[in-house]
């Protein structure tokens, strides 16, 4: 059900206190007024701290700067008179013992009356003593149909024409913005060149980056990496390429569900983050990066509110890629944390959404320490697949050297001995190979010449790879993957060959 259906159901069921957290106050009030009209044309009383009650001739300005008096008006109306009381920014007064007690008294009295109190606020803050009395109802950002209607009205007003794919692209680019921001950015486009056109998508994307940046939860991450920039990982790349068109309407007609996501577990520096960026670029979907640490705030209830805000924003931007880097660090050992269960509740909300989401949000989570991950997150249904990304083989290291050198020295690639470089760098990860090349470039630059194969090998000899310094951790990860708990990202990895030999051995 949508917001209007949910809200009207709460009105009919006589829920006395309804809390709607939203930044779109004006749009929410329009939706409430529409629902009130459907429910027998209920009277609406709107209050805020500065102007008191507004719009009602008999009570205009009543209870100005007095939230407790604003609640008194509800008792003064006839018990049989249907009404909705919208109280703006009322979360700021909920810690007042008199206001809290009055709301709880009203919650009991209004169960038998056709009256509802709606707390309209920009954030969700619920004191413990009101948690049972309040019913929270989310107000979603505008969907594609609402945005399309708004865009078409602007097109008509400016005598502009936009049809087919151009109109769809414009509407899709607006998803994830509030209606007020959509109007503002389209007005800016009109002010710039007199009309709304397909070229305004970049303008809208910049507005979207600003909005996401202001949430301080998600980052709008520009992705320019290609699948071809990933050296090795053939199994993983094949899996991704097969799902390239899975977000299309043709896939829906075929009966395919939206891909849910994947978990990339493995050794640091083996290309997990690079893969997330490459998926976004190859599938032509926006990439949102979530820093899970930003979800946790100092105020009670704010962390849970931020989690809901993150989910709402990601779903509004769908189809999109949600990249969660190093998820193992965020939820490691949360059972023993002394945070009054905040981490546990955030984790519960997050994994429930992972399992039940219907929106086309493809989640890419990366993890280095699989031991610290709660077992619930590895359960089937959270992700489409769990891939183990191990150390590259000799052939894969050659591919990685080739990828980097093709970018750094595209015209001189032939002067580098790729086979020798791959052979001389056992146990090196992709990140460590890249660091070898950077060190070699510094060496060549300091001597006013180009860097050579010998410079790269000289740099490699100075680096001790992680596979040797963290040998126990690497061995544990390889044994975990070999036990069949994850799919191997590489076809010809050392681990893959070892598993094949084990399967071929007679019992």
Image: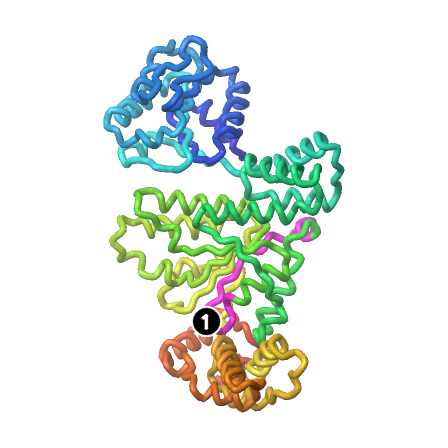
Residue 253 within the segment the image draws in magenta:
yes
* Number of residue marks: 1
**Does residue 280 sit above or below 122 in this rendering?**
below
Q: Which residue is mark 1?
A: 266
Q: Quadrant of residue 77?
A: top left
Q: Which residue shows up at 50% across the image and 48% down it?
A: 212
Q: Position of residue 273 (x, y in %)?
A: 50, 66
Q: How is the image coloured?
A: rainbow
Q: Quadrant of residue 396?
A: bottom right
Residue 435 within the segment the image draws in magenta:
no
Can residue 64 be seen here? The reply is yes
* Dot 1 alpha-carbon crowd within 10 angstroms: few under 14, some 14 to 19, many 20 or more: many
**Does residue 303 sit above or below 434 in this rendering?**
above
Figure quadrant of the N terminus? top right
Q: Quadrant of residue 70?
A: top left
Q: Which residue shows up at 43% across the image and 32% down it?
A: 20
User: Which segment is the magenta one?
Assistant: 251-273
Q: Which residue shows up at 74% across the image and 40% down it?
A: 162
Closer to the camera in the image, 43 or 446: 446
**Does residue 255 sit above or below 410 in this rendering?**
above
Q: Position of residue 202 (x, y in %)?
A: 63, 49
Q: Position of residue 488 (x, y in %)?
A: 52, 73
* Label 1 residue SS: strand
Can residue 494 be seen here? The reply is no
């Amino acid at each position: 059900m949508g917001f209007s259906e949910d809200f009207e159901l709460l009105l009919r069921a006589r829920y006395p206190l309804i809390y709607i957290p939203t930044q779109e106050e004006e749009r929410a009030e329009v939706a409430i007024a529409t629902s009130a009209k459907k429910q027998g044309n209920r009277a609406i009383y709107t209050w805020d701290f500065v102007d008191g009650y507004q719009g009602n001739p008999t009570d205009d300005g009543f209870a100005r700067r007095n939230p407790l008096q604003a609640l008194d008006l509800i008792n003064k109306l006839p018990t049989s008179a249907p009404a909705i009381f919208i109280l703006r920014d009322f979360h700021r007064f909920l810690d007042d013992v008199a206001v809290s007690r009055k709301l709880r008294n009203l919650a009991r009295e209004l169960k038998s009356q056709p009256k509802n109190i709606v707390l309209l606020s920009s954030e969700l803050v619920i004191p413990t003593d009101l948690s049972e009395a309040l019913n929270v109802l989310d107000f979603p950002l505008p969907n594609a149909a609402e945005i399309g209607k708004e865009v078409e009205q602007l097109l008509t007003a400016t005598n502009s024409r936009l049809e087919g794919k151009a109109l769809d692209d414009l509407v899709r680019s607006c998803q994830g913005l509030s209606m007020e921001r959509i109007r503002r950015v389209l007005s800016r486009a009109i002010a710039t060149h007199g009309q709304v056109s397909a070229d305004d998508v970049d303008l809208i994307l910049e507005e979207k980056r600003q909005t996401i940046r202001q949430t301080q939860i998600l980052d709008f991450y520009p992705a320019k990496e290609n699948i071809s920039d990933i050296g090795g990982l053939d199994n993983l790349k094949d899996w991704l390429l097969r799902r390239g068109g899975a977000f299309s309407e043709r896939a829906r007609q075929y009966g395919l569900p939206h891909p849910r996501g994947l978990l990339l577990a493995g050794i640091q520096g083996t290309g997990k983050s690079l893969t997330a960026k490459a998926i976004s670029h190859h599938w032509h979907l926006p990439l949102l990066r979530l820093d899970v640490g930003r979800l946790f705030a100092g105020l009670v209830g704010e962390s849970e509110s931020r989690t809901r805000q993150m989910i709402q924003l990601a779903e509004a931007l769908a189809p999109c890629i949600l990249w969660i880097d190093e998820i193992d660090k965020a939820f490691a050992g949360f059972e023993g944390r002394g945070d009054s269960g905040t981490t546990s509740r955030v984790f519960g909300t997050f994994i429930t959404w992972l399992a039940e989401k219907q929106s086309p949000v493809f989640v890419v989570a990366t993890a280095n320490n699989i031991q610290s991950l709660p077992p619930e997150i590895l359960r089937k249904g959270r992700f489409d697949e769990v891939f183990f990304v191990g150390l590259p083989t000799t052939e894969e290291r050659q591919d990685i050297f080739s990828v980097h050198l093709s970018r750094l020295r595209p015209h001189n690639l032939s002067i580098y001995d790729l086979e020798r470089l791959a052979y001389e760098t056992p146990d090196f990860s992709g990140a460590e190979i890249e660091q070898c090349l950077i060190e070699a470039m510094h060496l060549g630059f300091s001597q006013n010449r180009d860097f050579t194969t010998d410079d790269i090998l000289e740099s490699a000899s100075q680096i001790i790879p992680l596979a040797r310094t963290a040998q126990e951790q690497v061995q544990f990860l390889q044994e975990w993957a070999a036990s069949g708990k994850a799919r191997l990202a590489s076809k010809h990895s050392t681990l893959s060959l070892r598993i094949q030999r084990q399967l071929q051995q007679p019992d």
